C-alpha cells in the first residue's frame, strides 16, 4: 500500500483553483521532487498534504501505517524565524510535540530522540547555542533534525537549500540522500534546482502545464521533462 496517495485533488484558495485533477502516490523509500513554475501550486500542495488547508476537491490518503501527524516538515524560513531566540536543543525537541499528547513535558525517550537526531545531523556540539547565532546551513540542519523527531517514515521539504552557499547546499543534499538511502526515509521535496532533482530523485511531479507524474527516466523522455530540463528549471 502507498504511504501517501492524492486522489483527484484540486487545490486553491477561496474557491479558485491553482492546481486541478492531481493524482499520484508515494511509496516507502521514494525520493519525489516536485518541480514547476512559480505560482503553479507546489507549496499549496505541500500545505494541503500537511492538513494546513483543505483541498477544494478530492482527498489525500495515508497508508502503510503512516498517520497524518507523523509527517516531518521542513518549511521555507522567513527572516523572523531565522532570528528566533531559542536554543538548538529546544528547537529540535519541539519536533516531538505531537508525541507528547497532554503531557506538559518531554519524556526521556523524546529527549534521547532529539539528541540522536542532532548527532545524525552533525550539530550535537551546537545544542546549547542560540539558533539565531548559527549560519544558514547550520540552521537548516537544526530544522531537519526537528523534522526527523516528528517522523520515521516521511519528510516534506520545501526548498531546503534556499539561500545556502554552494558548500552548505552540497552538504544538505548529501544529508537528505543519506536519510533516504541509508535510513529508508521517504522524501518529498519541492525544488527549483533541476540539476539536483534529476540527480537525486526517483520520481518527479511536474505541476502546472503540462502535468506529469512518474519516474525520473519517464520524465526525461516526456515533453514536459525535455522542455523544463533544457530551460534549466524554473525561471524566477
Image: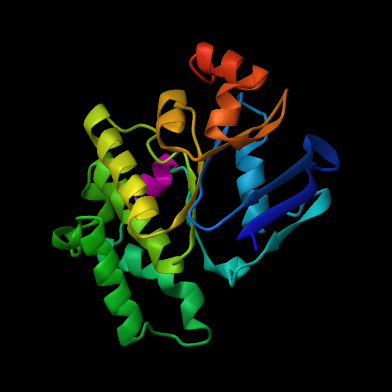
- How far from the left and from the top, in percent, is residue 65? 59, 72
- The residue depicted at 53 percent of the width and 16 percent of the height is 235
Q: Nearer the viewer, residue 82 or 146?
A: 146
Question: Looking at the image, what colour scheme do you see?
Answer: rainbow
- The residue depicted at 72 percent of the width and 51 percent of the height is 6
- How far from the left and from the top, in percent, is residue 158? 49, 42
Q: In the figure, residue 204 lies in which quadrant?
A: top right
Residue 124 on the magenta span? no
List the single residue furthest toward the left.
Answer: 125
Q: In the figure, residue 42 lies in which quadrant?
A: top right
Q: Nearer the viewer, residue 75 or 20?
A: 20
Q: Kindly report the secondary structure that dominates the magenta region of the rendered protein.
A: helix
- The residue depicted at 31 percent of the width and 74 percent of the height is 113
Residue 87 in view (yes/no):
no
- How far from the left and from the top, in percent, is residue 76? 47, 42
- The residue depicted at 67 percent of the width and 35 percent of the height is 41
Q: Nearer the viewer, residue 98 or 105?
A: 98
The stretch in magenta equals: 78-83
Q: In the figure, residue 119 lies in which quadrant?
A: bottom left
Residue 180 in view (yes/no):
yes
Picture layout, residue 22 above or below residue 73: above
- How far from the left and from the top, in percent, is residue 13? 77, 42
Amino acid at each position: 500500500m502507498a504511504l501517501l496517495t492524492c486522489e483527484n485533488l484540486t487545490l486553491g484558495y477561496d474557491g479558485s483553483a491553482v492546481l486541478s485533477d492531481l493524482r499520484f502516490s508515494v511509496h516507502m523509500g521514494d525520493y519525489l521532487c516536485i518541480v514547476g513554475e512559480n505560482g503553479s501550486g507546489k507549496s499549496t500542495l505541500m500545505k494541503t498534504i500537511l492538513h494546513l488547508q483543505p483541498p477544494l476537491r478530492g482527498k489525500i490518503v495515508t497508508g502503510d501505517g503512516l498517520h497524518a501527524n507523523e509527517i516531518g516538515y521542513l518549511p521555507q524560513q522567513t527572516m523572523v524565524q531565522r532570528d528566533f531566540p531559542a536554543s538548538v536543543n529546544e528547537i529540535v525537541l519541539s519536533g516531538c510535540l505531537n508525541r507528547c499528547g497532554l503531557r506538559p513535558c518531554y519524556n526521556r525517550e523524546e529527549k534521547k530522540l532529539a539528541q540522536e537526531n542532532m548527532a545524525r545531523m552533525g550539530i550535537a556540539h551546537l545544542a546549547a547555542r542560540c539558533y539565531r547565532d548559527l549560519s544558514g546551513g547550520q540552521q537548516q540542519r537544526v530544522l531537519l533534525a526537528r523534522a526527523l523527531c516528528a517522523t520515521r517514515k516521511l519528510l516534506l521539504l520545501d526548498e531546503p537549500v534556499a539561500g545556502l552557499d554552494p558548500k552548505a547546499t552540497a552538504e544538505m543534499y548529501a544529508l537528505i540522500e543519506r536519510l533516504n538511502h541509508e535510513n529508508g526515509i521517504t522524501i518529498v521535496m519541492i525544488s527549483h534546482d533541476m540539476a539536483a532533482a534529476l540527480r537525486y530523485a526517483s520520481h518527479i511531479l511536474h505541476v502546472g502545464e503540462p502535468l506529469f507524474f512518474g519516474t525520473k527516466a519517464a520524465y526525461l523522455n516526456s515533453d514536459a521533462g525535455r522542455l523544463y530540463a533544457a530551460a534549466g528549471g524554473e525561471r524566477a
